[in-house]
């Protein structure tokens, strides 16, 4: 009987479930706090100097280069700048689309500390692979946009490309700490409410052999995902239904119990990230873009942005699958 197992004694539950879950929650909380502090300090503003040579190579106008620089500080502010320029007639629809895609790398770098510091406590060293793959995809999108824009646009007149981002004043440590702590307190309950129940659920499913049953079903119905182990399905479903934190809770559980290797977890998170593209667009991007652009234009920008994102993520996932 399962209840007679040593793992369901108090000592067994503490060592196999309680302590790993507590360690996971402490690591996630620490990572979230540090990431909020890094974002509040706006550390990525120093990378804005990359805008000038890249924008010139892409034949993008001054305002597109300034938007790229500004995206290292605030992607929303970068979109606001593009919106104002488009409404003023400074950017055509094509230039607006390309400028928005051009911002893929800085927009990702703003949130990369959060992603890394949330995945590290769960995956350990393999978190470098997951974050590295997503970073490579973002860099690839910007590089592709540079080549595409260079082939579609004539060279623009010279101008200042970093003046707007450079004028951003330095954030003081005190203000950054207060802002980071405020965001941490607001986001921590959601992290715990999602992670703890999901971790326990995945532990129980692993213990009672649910994934062994799922393996047989997967073989007959999910042939196109047959390269993934059945334990990965829970991670993917949670990535679709919730956020990365929930998927990480499931990943941490099956990784701790030995149901998945680190490579399997990275692949599951990448596939879940790709398949959650439509939900991400509806849940996050559509409300944000609608505040800057007309609904029809916002939808076109989102479709182009998320379509290119999904394609780049699929490419790096395939490369990781065949090369690892």
Image: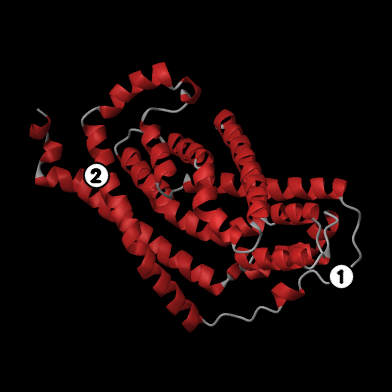
**Camera-side residue of 229 and 290:** 290
Measured as percent of width and height from the top left, residue 277 is found at 54, 43
Residue 313 appears in which quarter of the rendering?
top right
Relative to 38, 216 lies left or right = left
- Residue lying at 25% horizontally and 34% vertically, measured from the top left: 205
Q: Which residue is mark 1?
A: 159
- Residue lying at 61% horizontally and 46% vertically, measured from the top left: 306
**Camera-side residue of 54 and 242:** 242
- Residue lying at 46% horizontally and 76% vertically, measured from the top left: 179
Measured as percent of width and height from the top left, residue 320 is found at 57, 35
Measured as percent of width and height from the top left, residue 214 is found at 32, 24
> How many C-alpha atoms fall within 10 Å of the one at disc 2: few (<14), some, or many (≥20)?
some
> Rounded to the nearest whole Å, what is the CA distance between mark 1 and mark 2?
57 Å
Quadrant of the drawing holding the C terminus:
top right
Instruction: Identify the secondary structure beneath mark 2.
Output: helix
Instruction: Identify the secondary structure beneath mark 1.
Output: loop
Q: Earlier in the sequence, mark 1 or mark 2?
A: 1
Measured as percent of width and height from the top left, residue 269 is found at 47, 41
Residue 207 appears in which quarter of the rendering?
top left
- Residue lying at 24% horizontally and 27% vertically, measured from the top left: 209
Which disc, if any, is residue 180? Answer: none
Q: Which residue is mark 2?
A: 200
């Amino acid at each position: 009987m399962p209840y007679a197992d040593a793992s369901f004694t108090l000592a067994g539950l503490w060592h196999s479930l309680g302590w790993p879950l507590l360690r996971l929650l402490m690591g996630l909380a620490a990572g979230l706090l540090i990431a909020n502090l890094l974002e509040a300090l706006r550390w990525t503003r120093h990378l804005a100097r990359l805008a000038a040579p890249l924008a010139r190579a892409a034949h993008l106008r001054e305002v597109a280069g300034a938007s790229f620089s500004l995206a290292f500080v605030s992607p929303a502010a970068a979109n606001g700048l593009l919106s104002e320029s488009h409404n003023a007639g400074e950017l055509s629809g094509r230039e607006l689309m390309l400028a928005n895609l051009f911002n893929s790398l800085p927009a990702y770098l703003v949130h990369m500390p959060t992603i890394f510091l949330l995945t590290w406590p769960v995956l350990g060293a393999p978190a470098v692979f997951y974050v590295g793959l997503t970073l490579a995809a973002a860099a690839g999108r910007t590089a592709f946009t540079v080549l595409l824009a260079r082939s579609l646009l004539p060279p623009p007149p010279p101008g200042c490309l970093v003046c707007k981002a450079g004028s951003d004043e330095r954030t003081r440590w005190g203000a950054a700490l207060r802002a980071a702590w405020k965001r941490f307190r607001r986001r921590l309950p959601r992290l715990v409410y999602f992670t703890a129940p999901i971790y326990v659920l995945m532990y129980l499913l692993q213990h009672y052999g649910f994934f062994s049953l799922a393996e047989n079903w997967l073989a007959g119905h999910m042939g196109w995902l047959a390269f993934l182990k059945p334990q990965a399905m829970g991670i993917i479903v949670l990535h679709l239904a919730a956020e990365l934190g929930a998927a990480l809770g499931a990943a941490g559980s099956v990784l701790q119990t030995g149901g998945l290797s680190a490579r399997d977890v990275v692949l599951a998170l990448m596939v879940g990230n790709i398949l959650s593209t439509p939900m991400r667009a509806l849940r996050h991007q559509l409300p944000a873009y609608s505040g800057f652009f007309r609904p029809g234009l916002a939808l076109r920008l989102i479709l182009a942005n998320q379509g290119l994102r999904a394609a780049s993520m699929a490419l790096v996932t395939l490369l990781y699958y065949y090369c690892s």
